Image (cartoon, grey):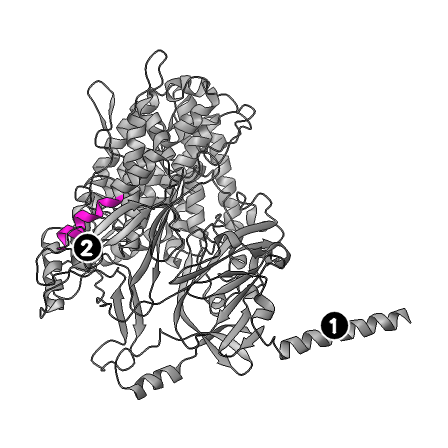
Amino acid sequence: MRKLFLLAVLSTTIASAQNREAHPAATLGAITQNLKKFEGFYTFYYDDKTGKVYLQLDRFNEEFLYFRSMPEGIGNGGPERGQASAVVAKFIKAGAKILLLQPNYYAYRGSGSADEQKAATDAFAQSVLWGFSPAAVEGDKVLIDLTPFLVRDALDIGGRIGSGRGNPGSAASARGGDNRAGGGYRLDETRSAINIDNTRDFPKNTEFEAWVTFTGNGEGGRRGGVAPDPGAVTVRLHQSFVQLPDSNFHARAFDPRSGFFDFEYQDFSAAMSEPLTKRFIERHRLQKKDPKAAVSEPVEPIVYYIDPGAPPLIRQALVEGGSWWNQAFEAAGFKNAFQVKVLPEGADPMDIRYNMVNWVDRSGYPARAFSYGASYIDPRTGEIIKGVVTLGSDRHREDFLIAEGLLQPYENGKPVSGEMQRMALARIRQLSAHEIGHTLGLTHNFAASIKDRASVMDYPFPRFTVKTDGSIDLSDVYATGIGSWDKRAITWGYSEFAPGADEQASLDKIMRETLKEGFRYIPDVGGGAHPLSNQWDDGPDPIAQLDKLMKARRMLLDRFSEKAIPQGAPMATLEEVLVPIYLLHRYQVEAVSKYIGGLYFTHAVKDDGQVPTEMVTPEDQWKALSALMGTISPAQLALPEKLIKSIPPRPSGYPSSIETFGGHTGPTFDPLGAAESDADNTLSYLFDEARAARLIEYHARDERQPGLMPMLDTILNGTWKAPLAPGYAGELQIVVDNLVLKHLLGLAVSSRASESVRGEAMLEAHDLYVWINAHLGEAGPRQKAAFYFALEEITEFDKDPAKFTPDPSLEMPPGAPIGD
């Protein structure tokens, strides 16, 4: 009888629930009367008892910007903070349901008749991002439960944890998210909830945030840990509904030489003589009060606000560095058009009306202080609605650490130099300008360093000089003010021309002047090929700069001592300061490696006078190889015996971390391990698969070009086939020899390498096997041991190359405090 009663109660409950779904509450007040109300762009209510968010709709078929972003990231090769997705969306009624629809703006007719536009719209699918059943209906007003839409995997985060896929997956994005997560991770709704503290409403934007937790087997965290418990990864996911701008914005056509980000769509009404794809730049709206004046104040300036939570010295540096951009806008004909202020009390940084520079605390020291510049973009026009810069709060500590190693400032009885702080603040000014530059629409320009540090959109290397007395001069460590390239870029992107002027002709004139002045623009696509497009390099000649840097590095290492750490610091912490000095050349090595199989190229357009491509001369390639071989010589890899003896095992409270060297010797400092990670960096560039393929291709087209096998012969002659030095130097040489073999065999089996590359690498490995056998009898015990190891490795390789996998080398501590 009791079971029948419970069954009847359960049936009644299910029927009631079904009835509520089919027949929503008659009035909104029946649900919202005791809930917290948020009024703004879209009115919503929050129920703190259930954690639900109810959205009130009274405007349908009205487009707005739907923005998804990650205020914090996973790391470890997965989703990073700052990743975002923005689309146009609208709520529509479909019978008893409310749908959130994303129109297909990629397949969009920007011109043509209404019939042509309809034909294009009908030819391509749209996307329904979510469907809702009304919780209440009252006249034209509808109340929907938005909670499931907010508490979900809207950026395919779970599928990318530990997978190495850093960018949002397009399939999941089109679906609006998927609770199924790859890599063993799945959204756990029981551990996910609305974050009401960051859920707010403003006149032009409505902001929602949720804590989302992904649970799995922890596989995604094995390479360094993505969370305190790798089996439960929790991040914040932010979603926004933003009012779209009016139609008065003037879009500017994209030019690949301009230095601006582009957006594009398909115009199917374009004449057959015109391209289907229409490309425009991303930029803020900026207009002159007096369009006829050469220099005019703006109708409305671009204003950026600094997070008041930044420490006072940092805050001032952020204001100063960000304000440099006004110099560029002055060059473009605007007066006081770009301003930087501290966010006033009572203003909310999430308000769409405020361009923000946020200062975000990170845990750990020294932390990898990631920073980025992102923007809310109108995907119809490319107009930047709001710039959002996020700066990692430990960024200045990285430069302070480098300065400690350069200056060795801690001497008993002497005051500590203020140069470290000055260097760190100089870098913060650069960082502020750089990240704000991205939110103005500018990409990186990694070729700027060759023209007297022409752009803050490059990654700057700390410039120092060694005085005649051996002391270090940091007076010119980072550039001050906006760069000359930046002025040219802003002039092209933001100049407003007099009424009646031919805009395209005026833009072409600006571009011709820029090219005539000798500016080069190569963004991230410079990759491993362009010798003059590099991150964190310095000077017009990368090879000469590497030689200069190696000499300074050797001097710094030879005198490195306890003066690098303050009084009372454990001697083991010398290692943290040693790392950036020992690896001071790591980025210059990358720059020089690009000469080998390198290609000078430009983003030339027809008849602009630029040379599209030009191979690097054979002389420069051999010169670069010689310089790189010098970086893996025992003379450069060795550490002074006194320094090695000064670094004891880590004491309690000071564990090793990613900021210290790896090793093979257990708790003791391993100088051979440090050398292994350093030399492996150089060799990874020399044995790069794409570089090897270019060497073969270029030699086939021009027999004067070096070719792959002659390069490999030179490397083997300088390592395996060189006489073995005694003692410590000899062991360093064996470390390098083994790395060379590892990379050679790795190249021979790499699925990323072409068949020609793999074939030539196999031939070189076989020739080395023959050479070692021929010289085995004359080798001493230490070299003979290395020879036997090499023979065994090559023999294992020959058994089944497809299954051969070289053991990984020790990794360098990270060096780039950025979000790439």
Decide which of 619, 326 is in the foreground and name it. Answer: 326
- Magenta span main SS: helix
Q: Earlier in the sequence, mark 1 or mark 2?
A: 1
Element under disc 2 = helix
- 643 or 402, which lies in front? 402
Q: Residues within 10 Å of mark 1 (few under 14, many from 20)?
A: few
* x and y percentages locating residue 332 in the rendered image: 14, 55
Judge left or right: residue 28 versus residue 742. right
Q: Could you tell me the amino acid type at mark 1?
A: Thr
User: The residue tagged with tag 1: helix, strand or loop?
Assistant: helix
331 magenta-colored: yes
Q: Nearer the viewer, residue 35 or 255?
A: 35
Residue, far bottom: 115
Single out the mark in the foreground, 1 or 2.
1
Question: Where does the image place residue 435, in percent across and percent down from the top left?
Answer: 31, 48
Question: Is 593 located above or below residue 337 in the figure?
Answer: above
The numbered dot on residue 534 is none
Q: Report the disc number at residue 490.
A: 2
**What residue is shown with label 1?**
13
Q: Residue furthest right?
A: 1
Chain part drawn in magenta: 322-333
Query: Who's the residue at 30% across and 54% down the image?
Result: 439
